[in-house]
């Protein structure tokens, strides 16, 4: 009722109503905001992550401090099609991952999920654990937020999640950063591109 009253107001005053204009959306180059994590940075020095159960806290800054080479691979969702069929299997089967792990390096997958989901996902993708890749849960998303690699995925997943990314570490520091510009695509962060 009030909408009608306001829409007929210009006519009541003897004026023509201005035509409604469609809202225009300005597209940016990509949907990712600038990253906090930079080349040369250490990983956040906190026990944000957990492995297999809530009591097994993991501090990646400590774990990578004395490691020559390593990878941190971030995914938006365990068990999602792109993560399960392409992204993580590419790392599991990549010969350079075996080389890194064989030399005492570490390779971890991180997702904003609970540790039980991550354990079940690891059991599905790498049941014997032959790859040496560890699957870590970021249950509150604090590790992901500390790196500023989170994005608003409430409409899809119900909370903020990690962008799809890979961090290459050398001597405990970030050597290179590979983040999908649209947050969830599978190009920049694939094993064949990161480990080329």
Image (spheres, helix red, strand yellow):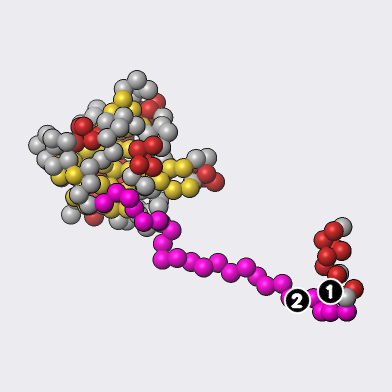
Q: Which mark is residue 18?
A: 2
Q: Residue extending furthest front?
A: 13
Q: Magenta region's main secondary structure?
A: loop
Q: Is residue 159 magenta?
A: no
Q: Is residue 114 visible?
A: yes
Identify the magenta region: 14-38
Residue lying farthest to the right in this orientation: 12
Drawn side of residue 133 relative to residue 32, left or right:
left
* Tag 1 near tag 2, CB within 8 Å: yes
In the image, residue 117 above or below residue 9? above
Residue that numbered label 1 is attached to: 10
Of all residues, the one furthest to the left in this rendering is 103
Residues packed near mark 2 inside 10 Å, few (<14), some (14 to 19) or many (20 plus): few
When the figure is inspected, residue 17 is found, relative to residue 145, above or below; the finding is below
Say few, some or many: other residues with alpha carbon within 10 Å of mark 1 (under 14 / 14 to 19 / 20 or more).
few
Quadrant of the image for the N terminus? bottom right
């Amino acid at each position: 009722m009030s909408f009608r009253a306001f829409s007929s107001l210009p006519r009541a005053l003897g004026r023509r109503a201005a035509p409604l204009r469609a809202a225009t959306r300005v597209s940016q180059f990509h949907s990712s905001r600038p990253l906090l994590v930079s080349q040369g940075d250490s990983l956040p020095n906190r026990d944000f992550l957990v492995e297999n159960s809530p009591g097994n806290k993991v501090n990646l800054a400590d774990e990578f401090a004395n490691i020559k080479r390593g990878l941190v691979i971030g995914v938006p969702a365990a068990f999602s099609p792109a993560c399960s069929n392409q992204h993580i299997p590419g790392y599991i089967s990549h010969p350079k991952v075996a080389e890194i792990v064989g030399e005492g390096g570490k390779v971890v997958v991180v997702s904003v999920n609970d540790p039980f989901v991550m354990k079940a996902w690891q059991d599905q993708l790498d049941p014997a654990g032959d790859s040496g890749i560890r699957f870590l849960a970021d249950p509150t998303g604090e590790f992901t937020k500390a790196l500023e690699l989170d994005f608003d995925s409430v409409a899809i997943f119900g909370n903020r999640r990690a962008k799809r990314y890979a961090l290459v570490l050398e001597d405990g520091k970030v050597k290179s950063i590979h983040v999908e510009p649209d947050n969830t695509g599978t190009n920049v962060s694939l094993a064949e591109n990161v480990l080329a």
